[in-house]
Amino acid sequence: MDAGNQQRILGYFIEEAKEHLDTIEKGLLNLPSVVKEPERVNEMFRAAHSVKGGAAMLGFSSIQKTAHRLEDAFKILKENDMKVDRKLESLFLQVYDTLKDLIEQLQGPFGLREGDAEKTMQAAEQKFAQLQKYIHHLMSSRGEAAATPAEEAKAQTGLPPNFGTQVTDILKQMLQLFKQKETPESRRKLQAQCKRLAQLGAGINTWQKLLQTSYKAIANPKNPYQKLAPVVIKEIKQASDRLQTGNSSEIAVSQDLQQLVSATPTPAATTATKQITLTVEPKAAAKELIQAFDKKQLSQLVKLLVQATRASSS
């Protein structure tokens, strides 16, 4: 996969992350009333989870870690009746600001440089610790033991315990395959990864259909990797997020992915492979060219011939 497609996938992540940031920010700015509405808390949880997964797939560990800590905190809010005060609001917003800052750096002209990310994380470490400590304080003040997220039982979604981690690892492998030369062997390896992903969500019809469609799109040799990669990776990633948050019914095959299954060569591609034989007699050669090319192509050819003539006479 070339640099242009890597940038396109990064663009998708940033665009999606900014939407999730907006969801989180709106929730935090009105947290005392939001905690009384389970679905709104769940929206913030899903938003943090999605950012975490996307960052993990692309290798942005600082963003992944920050989103993960927010996700863990939102999970406690979601599963416990907790009174929100101004201090808790402030601590949440400070951690949120760290996540927002990291994504803004990623979007900047120089990207998210490792040294800058490390400094941001070091400066935020105290904020993370204060938020966790205060949440535990609020829990213990109600006479409840505040279990850590790792100690809490996972929701019964029918998925393997490490489903998210496995999906992320497979998507990373697929990204590496998309960077390689397009060959029948690399396509077979990509299809094998689709089968592995399908097995992880065995029995979930919407997930199975998405992976079957992705398998067929990859099998179509008319689809170049630069076109396949952004669509396939994004669709599987989004579907994985929905499965992990209990929204399997929201998984659907997009029109873009469906079109890749039945893709046919574009007129430009067909013309590019066409070969003609020219005679050395100028008039006859011109006649052959007029029959072989359309008006736009002839205009381009004329410009090239003019440039070549000038170059040869200089």
Image (cartoon, rainbow, N blue to C red):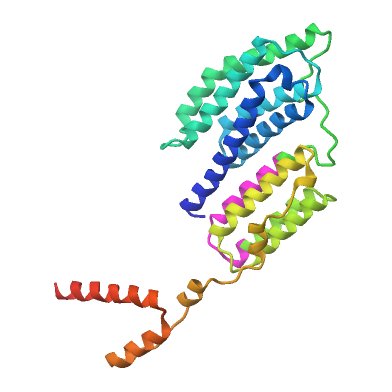
From this view, report whether residue 185 is shown above or below residue 58: below
Residue sitting at x 74%, y 59%: 212
Q: State the residue at coordinates (66%, 68%).
A: 262
Pick the front one: 155 or 200: 155
Residue 233: % across, % down:
63, 50
Work out whether residue 276 can be spotted. Answer: no
Kindly report the secondary structure that dominates the magenta region of the rendered protein.
helix
Is 175 within the magenta?
Answer: yes
296 relative to 183 in the view: left or right: left
The tally of labels here is: 0
Q: Specify start and end residues of the magenta stretch as a single range.
A: 165-186
Q: Could you tell whether 115 is left or right of 25 in the image?
A: left
Q: Position of residue 121 (x, y in %)?
A: 54, 23
Q: Is residue 282 magenta?
A: no
Q: Is residue 262 visible?
A: yes
Q: Residue most toward the left? A: 314
The percent position of residue 15, horizontal first and vertical second, equals 56, 40
Q: Is residue 124 above or below residue 244?
A: above
| Image position of 46 (left or right of 4) | right
Residue drawn 64% across the image and 34% down it: 52
Image quarter of residue 128? top right
Q: Position of residue 260 (x, y in %)?
A: 63, 63
- Residue at image location 80% in from the left, 23% down from the top: 79
Q: Is residue 58 above or below residue 254?
A: above
Query: For this view, does 313 lie left or right of residue 133?
Result: left
Q: Quadrant of the C terminus?
A: bottom left
